[in-house]
Image (cartoon, rainbow, N blue to C red):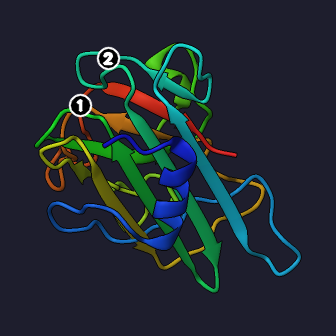
Amino acid sequence: MRVPAFLLILLAAAGVGACAGPSAPLQNAPARGASPDGQVTLSGAGDFTPADTDAIVYDRKLVPEGAQASVSVESSGGQTRTSLVVEGLLPSRTYGAHLHTKPCGKKPNDSGPHYQHHAGKIDPVSEVWLDITTDGEGTGRSSARNDWVLAPDRLPGSLVIHAKPTVTSGPQAGQAGDRVACLTLS
């Protein structure tokens, strides 16, 4: 069943969707500005098609034509909460997913490095890790919560989907293979 991108956003906000595997710690993805009460909200959604400039594919083998994703980030009250919903990816596969510092671009590295709350600290406490395991139809959901808020003057610019699950320890911690798709946050 295909779900339009706007419905994916609603599902992500409502916390509805298929979830395979354990959730990552919840982390918040900020918006481009703060509200008067200090809340920061960011979101990104799209169809991974050539016409959608906010949803870019770098590897069509791992992100098939017609795949969709949406991400929402809310940061307030000492926490950042991030939710990701995908549809149409490869079935029964785990992808890494992280917030990155810059918006998506034509080249995979245009989105910059992982967003880090504590510069130089590579772990799910400082970064937003949203690894996602798809079900038999290529649908998946992930969420993260971090005990910090986004600074309105230093917000992440994108969510990047990676080819492999995130390495959680050792010298390769934080790495998740090639960048296969990207959603620009606004």
Q: Nearer the viewer, residue 139 or 29?
A: 139
State the mark number for residue 108: none
Q: Is residue 150 left or right of residue 64?
A: right
Place of residue 92 in the rendered image (x, y in percent of width and height, measured from the top left): 10, 43
Place of residue 145 in the rendered image (x, y in percent of width and height, measured from the top left): 43, 73
Place of residue 82 in the rendered image (x, y in percent of width and height, measured from the top left): 48, 64
Camera sees residue 112: yes
Instruction: Give the residue at x 18% y 68%.
Output: 22
- Vertical relation: 133 (above or below) 79: above
Quarter occupied by the N terminus: top left
Q: Is residue 129 left or right of residue 92?
A: right
Q: CA distance from mark 1 to mark 2?
A: 9 Å
Secondary structure at numbered mark 1: loop
- For marks 1 and 2, the one nearer the N-term is 2
User: In the current view of this chain or complex, which residue is farthest to the bottom?
Assistant: 77
Amino acid, disc 2: Asp
Amino acid, disc 1: Ala
Place of residue 6 in the rendered image (x, y in percent of width and height, measured from the top left): 58, 48
Instruction: Give the residue at x 44% y 42%.
Output: 69
| Residue 168 position by quadrant | bottom left
Q: Is residue 23 left or right of residue 3?
A: left
Dots 1, 2 in contact, CB < 8 A: yes
Camera sees residue 123: no
Instruction: Give the residue at x 77% y 55%.
Output: 153
> According to the image, label 1 marks what residue?
163
| Residue 39 position by quadrant | bottom right
Instruction: Give the residue at x 70% y 46%.
Output: 186
* Pointer 2 local density, CA inside 10 Å: few below 14, some 14–19, many at least 20: some
Q: Nearer the viewer, residue 107 or 133?
A: 133
User: In the current view of this chain or complex, which residue is farthest to the right?
Assistant: 36
> According to the image, label 2 marks what residue?
59
* Pointer 1 local density, CA inside 10 Å: few below 14, some 14–19, many at least 20: many
